[in-house]
Amino acid sequence: MKNWLFLSVLICSLISTGQDITIKDATSKKGVPFATISFGNGKGTFADDDGIFRFTKKLYKDVDSLYISSIGYQDLTVAANLVNTEILLTQEADQLEAVMLSAELNGKFKKKKQKPIAHDNYFNCWLPTVESEIAVRFNRIDNQPTRISQLQFPIVKEESQVSKKGKLRAFSTMVRIMFYDVENGQPSHRSFYPSITYVVTEKSDDIVEIDIDYLNINIPKTGIFAAIQILGYTTPDGKLIKAKKYREIQTVRGLQKVSTTYRPLLPFTNEVEGKQTWVRRIFYNNKEWVPFDLNYNPNSSLVRSGHDNYGIGAEFKVFYKED
């Protein structure tokens, strides 16, 4: 209750100091859910599922411009002093005519599983921030037509597992799953398969199972990447909280911006062979994907200890050709 009281006070304080802005489709005038708002200083935020986010110069004093993006829309730059209560995004011309063609896999199939790899060692966990995205590659089973029917995400819900009173601290975090095509072995364009959002709390299982059979995700010959991204904390009814995703801290080197970390933590593993995990910081480096290795961060304790993959599990339907 104390945690939810704190969140309620936080929400009320933000309402009194912030301005709600809605990102809409220029044609339909409907909200664009979970659009990305970059501030050009390595930080940013997301709109909620109604396309709404909060911004004022008082809240973001050093932000001069907002860079708005969402899959299927033209990127838009808006000067901070010209921001209105509505921002309209125009659909990309090539996206208007795009049609996803996916052959329906019918007939007999065998179910196959890839076991998720979990642990509860805080020191071998990724600390999620909204600026980071993690993608794991999946390939066809036995080089046969393969559909992903379920994804299984291992999580760690608390740094020390329990509070001083012996209970997990309450939290509610919105997570988004997206899919990416494979090009030259790395994530490239967003797949036309829709993204999925769900909420994780301290009551969630240590393995979060997401059924996606209804999406008919058939793995291409080159493979496919499934990516996970934290969008932020939510209210008790599952609405994304419109709050700053970073803090300013005064140091001897001046004012430093520190990204907020969110629960749950993501346990990385040293049990996966090869480089199956890629990461990117969506407000940095032109949103480029990089393999999670020493080139990404030579000081990373995860990489240096060999915990360089996120062990997402999955269930598959494999359609073997009959002899």
Image (cartoon, rainbow, N blue to C red):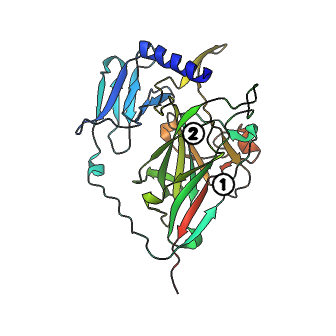
Residue pictured at 74% horizontal, 37% vertical: 122
Residue 232 on image: x %, y %: 52, 32
From the top left corner, tell me how far across and down residue 143 is, in percent: 55, 72
Q: Are marks 1 and 2 in contact (CB under 8 Å)?
A: no
Residue 185 visible in the displayed image: no
What residue do we see at 66% from left, 54% from top? 116
Foreground: 160 or 286? 160
Dot placed on the residue nearer the N-terminal end, 1 or 2: 1
Q: Amino acid at mark 1?
A: Pro
> Disc 2 marks which amino acid?
Val
The residue indicated by pointer 2 is 200
Q: Quadrant of residue 134?
A: top right
Q: Position of residue 229 (x, y in %)?
A: 53, 41
For the N terminus, the quadrant is top right
Against 247, is 210 above or below? below
Task: Give me the disc on residue 116.
Answer: 1
> Is 305 in front, or is 88?
88
x and y percent of residue 6 in the render? 57, 19
Q: Residue furthest bottom?
A: 323
Please tell me how crowded label 1 is: few (under 14), some (14-19), or many (20+) other residues with Cα within 10 Å.
some
Label 2 residue SS: strand
Q: Quadrant of residue 247?
A: top right
In screen coordinates, is 58 left or right of 232? left
Q: Nearer the viewer, residue 40 or 316?
A: 316
